Image: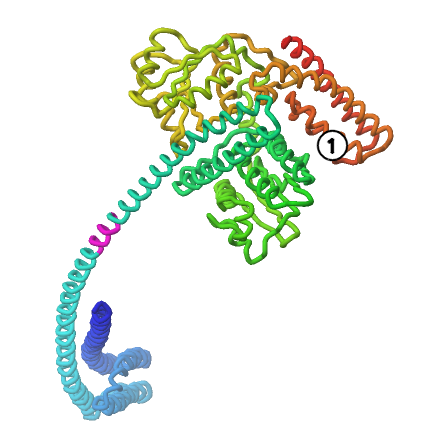
Amino acid sequence: MKLYTKILLASVFISSILLVVYLQFNTSRSINQLIRGNEDLINELQVKSQTEVLQKNIASLENKVKSAVIEDLPDTRLIIDSESEKIKTTFHLLDTLKNDSSIAPLLDELHKLIEEKIAFNVKITEIFNTDGKESAEAMINTHLGSLLSDSIRANIRLIDIAHRENITSLIEKADRNGQNAKTLGTIMGLIAAMASVFTFGYIAYKMREQQQLISLLKTSEQKALDAATIKEKFLANMSHEIRTPLNIILGFTQQLQKKKLDPDIKEEVEIIEQSGNSLLSIVNDILDLSKIEAGMMRIEKAGFSIRDTVQNMEKMFAPRAAAKGLHFNVHIDSSIPNIVIGDAERLMQILVNLVGNAIKFTEHGSIAIRIIDQGKINTNIKLGIVVSDTGLGIAPQKIQNIFKRFSQSDNALSRKYGGTGLGLSIVHELVTLQDGSLQVESEPMKGTTFILSIPYDTSFAIQAIGTTEKEPENNFIEWSNYKILIAEDNTMNRLLLNKIFTGWGLKFDEAKNGLEVIDYLQQQDYDLLLMDVQMPEMDGYQTTEEIRNKLQLTIPVIAMTAHAMPGEKDKCIAHGMSDYIAKPIRERELFTLLQKWLRSLKKDPPISFSTINLSYMRSISLGNIDFEKKITQDFIHCIPIEINTIKQYQLEQNITALRQAAHNFKTTISIMGLTEKLTPTLDDLEYKTLNDSEFNKLYRTLEKICTAALEEAKQFYTSLL
């Protein structure tokens, strides 16, 4: 039925168009004929006027010749020439009448008579000039001139009669054409009116149909939004329900690993931790995917060190690569600036996914990560990130599928190695969000290479802001000077935090819900509040608002939540909380967060150094003084030996050993935060071919910084005693 209606409408529309075109053609033709008829009528009226002028000019010629003879005037020939020219000019205007077959013979006759009339007057003039006045008057008094004048008038009357007949015909024709144009115009008007009514009705019908469609679309959209909301709530609840026990499993696993355990038990604990981390990785991938789908994955713009980020990744994966017997190599072009503006967290996430996959699917050979300078434009630099392995590789026909969600190149590999198939999809999305590009080169059983290109800003002004606003990190605080209130309803989570804080030497109290938090805060002072969001009686949001609005306290409130969906952190901040940490809580992340907020209280002066930076070591030690003593002692012992080794290899011209020593030295200095200061120098020693002068210059720089670092390390070691 719908097809029939469409065909009918199309037929009516086409027929109407053809009819309008036909009527328009006929109307135009009638109007054109009317215009031409009017032009012809005007021409005929002009001809009538010209015949009258012609008669006057002939009479004028005759009269002037007679007057010249009678008055005996000289130069009569000039009169003849002047008047004859006027007569001929007027006659030529009548040439348009020759198109009429009934008038053309009359015009020829008229032309002959006029020539005879002019010739007669010329003859009178000649006689006048030769024989005198009397002879000329005798010639005038003959009847020949009168007969010619009568013939001319008679001929003109015949032409006038023919004119009138033409004029009458033209008027009748113009009247007919005008009437036709009027009739056709009326028909077109009626058709236009009918078409307008039809069009209006059709448009009204389509608008009503469109409104119904819009209504259906709104209903569908609302259903989609409801489904998305349900999905988001489901993911949030699942995230909370999974992360809460994961927090306990991973937390207590970390506590167990600090103890001396039997080898079998230690291995079992490590298996538990690996399984927990795998589960956490799956949850995080699903949450990241949800953020990307919701358009809530934000790309931050802040200054960060490319070298620090890459070296942190290297420290994370080097042990795993070594455990599989893989050669793990990382190289950063020396031309790349240390500080760039971009999202360090997303870069780390990309590297972790790519390098993790490379190690997972490589059994023999090597893993290579190269950060290359692909060129600078103004204040922007394009970084190439190349991750290569010698692993299983990917068949060419399957490469296009590896970035699809929940997809892996081979189901058998999926069963063997596990994974959700989301990692590379997230990498692709993150690269795209940063205006980058991603390519893959692979060959089965020969390895895979991922080539990324991501632009970063290198603006000095932004770097200056980013670096000057950062709080100093090369200091530590005395935990025993502070007291913390823990708000947590879950018994296992409270027990975990109890063990962690006890190990750090922190003083703390515990509250099971928001009401207890308010009671504690009214009775005594605390330096920081660690607040679970989901609690009975009064949740974390309500409790924080009570603290800010009624108690008027500015105490730092750190939100703890197993909800890790997009916008959760913003929601916590909007309710007055100071910061946010997601469950499962990593001891190192918690340590860094508390150190940040407690340091801002400045209850004890930090120990600061100009060369070494203790932040990395403190993030590893997590307050373990014995560990810090041992690490510092090893640093003080190893630095002089390794410096001398580099010098000795240069003297022996053992360049291969020198380069390896320079590379190994990067690990030694990293524990004291010297990476940023010494990496450019060590990169030159490792990768460049140097003459003695160039080596000595670099070595003096290395020796100067290391000497200052040793002095500060000794001061720090003394402070720990």
Q: Is residue 115 left or right of residue 590?
A: left
* In the image: residue 302, left or right of residue 657: left
Mark yes or no: residue 432 visible: no
- Residue 262 placement: quadrant: top right
Hey, which quadrant is residue 573 in on the image?
top left
Say which quadrant the N terminus sits in: bottom left
Q: Quadrant of residue 242?
A: top left
Q: Is residue 583 left or right of residue 669?
A: left
Q: Magenta segment: does it hold 225?
A: no
- Find out whether residue 216 is within the magenta segment: yes
Residue 165 vertical placement versus 535 (above, below): below
**Label 1 CA crowd tier, 10 Å (few <14, some 14–19, many 20+):** some
Q: Main secondary structure of the magenta part?
A: helix
Magenta residues, start to end: 210-218
Q: Residue at x 74, y 20 (%)?
A: 639
- Which residue bears the numbered disc 1? 684
| Residue 487 in view of the camera | yes
Is 354 located above or below residue 121 in the figure?
A: above
Which quadrant would the C terminus be assigned to in this image?
Answer: top right
Q: Residue at x 33, y 23 (%)?
A: 535
For the residue marked with disc 1, what is the amino acid? Answer: Asp
